[in-house]
Image (cartoon, rainbow, N blue to C red):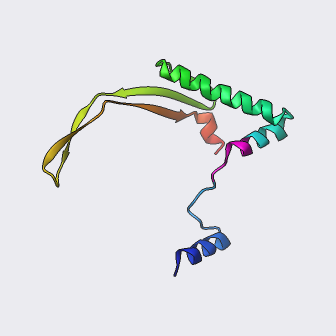
Amino acid sequence: MSSSTVSQEQEQTGTSTERPVVQTREIIEDIHKATGIERGEIGKVLTALYDACASRLANGEEIDLRGFMKMTIRDYQSRKYYVPPKEDYIERGPSTRVNIALAGAFKKKL
């Protein structure tokens, strides 16, 4: 059975394991329908939100969008990892990661 056949069967039965990816323009359209605000203005607000979050995170600040999510930056020190096939250690890091935790109220809506 080919992969295209499996995909067609999954589509027909609704058993697909892939989730649809929603694009920014679709979110903008949803907000436009709910509020009547012009699409261009919504796009500007989203861009400003992205920029503000990135700037705050870059400054080491925590972002708490109540009822939606919390974003924090975590710095990791460099560390050595053992690689069994090579019987040697490799060093990785240091690195910085963004941690995102969804709010309980938001999770309940899912």
How far from the left and from the top, in percent, is residue 97? 42, 32
Residue 71 magenta: no
Classify 7 as above or below 52.
below
Identify the residue at horizontal 30%, vertical 33% (top origin): 93
How far from the left and from the top, in percent, is residue 47? 67, 30
Q: Is residue 101 left or right of residue 36?
A: left
Q: In this orientation, does residue 65 appear? A: no
Q: In this orientation, does residue 8 appear? A: yes
20 or 39: which is nearer to us?
A: 39
Q: Report the span colored magenta.
A: 21-27
Residue 24 magenta: yes
Q: Quadrant of residue 46?
A: top right
How far from the left and from the top, in percent, is residue 3? 53, 74
Q: Where is the C terminus found, in terms of image quarters?
A: top right
Q: Is residue 63 left or right of residue 47?
A: left
Q: Quadrant of residue 76?
A: top left
Identify the residue at horizontal 62%, vertical 32% (top origin): 68
In this view, the residue farthest toward the bottom is 1
Q: Quadrant of residue 94?
A: top left
In this view, the residue farthest toward the left is 87
66 or 97: which is nearer to us?
A: 97
Identify the residue at horizontal 72%, vertical 28% (top origin): 45
Q: Is residue 76 left or right of residue 14?
A: left
